[in-house]
Amino acid sequence: MSAREQDQVASDAGLSKQRVVVEAVRLADREGVDGLSMRRLAGALGAGAMSLYHYVASKEELLDAMVDIVFEEIELAPEETDWQSAMRRRAVSARQVLARHPWAIGLMESRTSAGPANLRHHEAVTACLRRAGFPILMATHANWLLDSYVYGFALQAANLPFDTTDEFADMAENVFLPQLPPDEFPYLNESAAALVAAGYDPAEEFIFGLDLVLAALEPLRAPA
Amino acid sequence: MSAREQDQVASDAGLSKQRVVVEAVRLADREGVDGLSMRRLAGALGAGAMSLYHYVASKEELLDAMVDIVFEEIELAPEETDWQSAMRRRAVSARQVLARHPWAIGLMESRTSAGPANLRHHEAVTACLRRAGFPILMATHANWLLDSYVYGFALQAANLPFDTTDEFADMAENVFLPQLPPDEFPYLNESAAALVAAGYDPAEEFIFGLDLVLAALEPLRAPA
DNA sequence: TACTAGCAGCGTACACTGTACGATGAAGAA
DNA sequence: TTCTTCATCGTACAGTGTACGCTGCTAGTA
């Protein structure tokens, strides 16, 4: 089958691995990963359940492919700017993508194989750090630190029920504070009240830690 | 039922929420969270499947309770030392616990309710930071940064197939390097080779980023 | 044209899941 | 004795992943 015909099929009614995986991502975004079953996915594609197995060896492989599609949405570290700007852009992009597909975070654990998109990111990040003058070991440390921060932040943000200043204030006053006995949790009470009063904005939290980490990494560069 | 009788039941053949949840954690450790079904759990407890529902409203609630048990294993931030030592101890303990129960990391996402053990940790960490002189907003930032690093690191470590210098060298030489075309991934090739040659030890990776973060947070303290 | 091979698609079936419902039997109270 | 309460569990049902094998279409060959 020629490449042209493949495109034809993919954009038409016929199935293809692309179409299956993309629709699976859409379904998981809409209904969560628990709502993703082979039968429902097939239904969304107007096909029979077993037809999917012509494009995907198993549900596990489907999940792997879904995770890799998510990685493809993340901006690669750009080459033309200074290393801190490049790392910041990639981290912010990753955070946005993982906020769009929160199910992908939990899926990364238990999935040993790094997909091709994941590998390309590691290469681009390593390239950026090495060109900025980080020795190999320091670039490895920086890679771990940055990825840990991004994934960990996304993981925490995924189960918090607020994204904006107003939502935070609402949750703090109507849910957190009433549930936290002041004598048992004095500091949490103090914090929640003070953050609400100060108009705390959760959306800015990510950048703060990110910039702190980037600044702390700066001295680890060797003079070029 | 008195507290004594409850203990009796818990330590005897009879069921109890404690016994159910503890056995569920053991099963998940042994077989992964996918291998944990109500029927298998009941079997491990020598009971019928439906008996579990007298102690747990649903499997969701069971998973919540399992996550909270895991949090209980993490050392609370000690009060008697300087803030950096206290934070380091807690972070190292959390990393160890999450390495023992890797399934718990993926479970945290999708679980909105913070259990009591989780709340106690946040209180203890906040208390430590506040006493060390961090203003409320800075303590919040530090909390996010430290937790993100710990969880993100645990998440990454959970799907890596190596823990020691030897395992890393073996994987790098026999799996990574043969799979990475040098022209497409020049920097990853260079890094893998250099790290193997230098006897890279993955076990030390966690402390490096942790100490870097702690040092970067130090200047954010306000003078007491 | 007729025959064939390969292949996309899918219907059925099986072992397994979470759990609703109701039965069973034991223990204690009246 | 009878009644209530409660832990335990058997059965059943809808839904899961997927092995197996049947269709019908298309391309190629003779």
Image (cartoon, coloured by chain):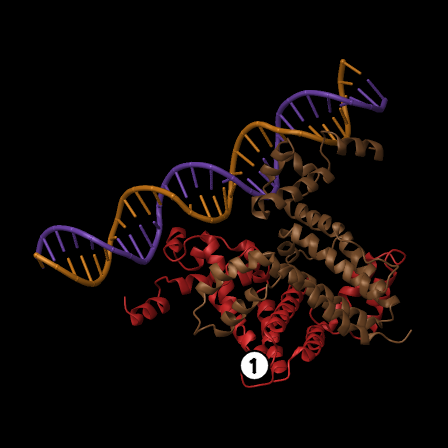
Chain colours: A red, B brown, C purple, D orange
Quadrant location of the C terminus of chain A? bottom right
**Horizontal relation, residue B168 to residue B19: left or right:** left
Coordinates of residue D25 in the picture (x, y in percent): 24, 58
Q: Measured along the vertical axis of the image, is residue B132 above or below residue B92?
A: below
Q: In this rendered view, identify the residue nearer to me: A1 or B213.
A: B213
Q: In this rendered view, identify the residue nearer to me: A54 or A30.
A: A54
Coordinates of residue A164 in the picture (x, y in percent): 71, 72
**Horizontal relation, residue A136 to residue A9: left or right:** right
**Horizontal relation, residue B179 to residue A139: left or right:** left
Q: Measured along the vertical axis of the image, is residue D23 above or below residue B142?
A: above
Query: Which quadrant holds residue A75?
Result: bottom right
Count all numbered tags in the image, as a single digit: 1
Q: Secondary structure at mark 1?
A: helix
Residue at image coords 76%, 74%: B216
Query: Which quadrant holds residue D20?
Result: top left
Coordinates of residue B28 in the picture (x, y in percent): 62, 45
Residue at label 1?
A131
Residue at image coords 55%, 64%: B196
* Chain under disc 1: A
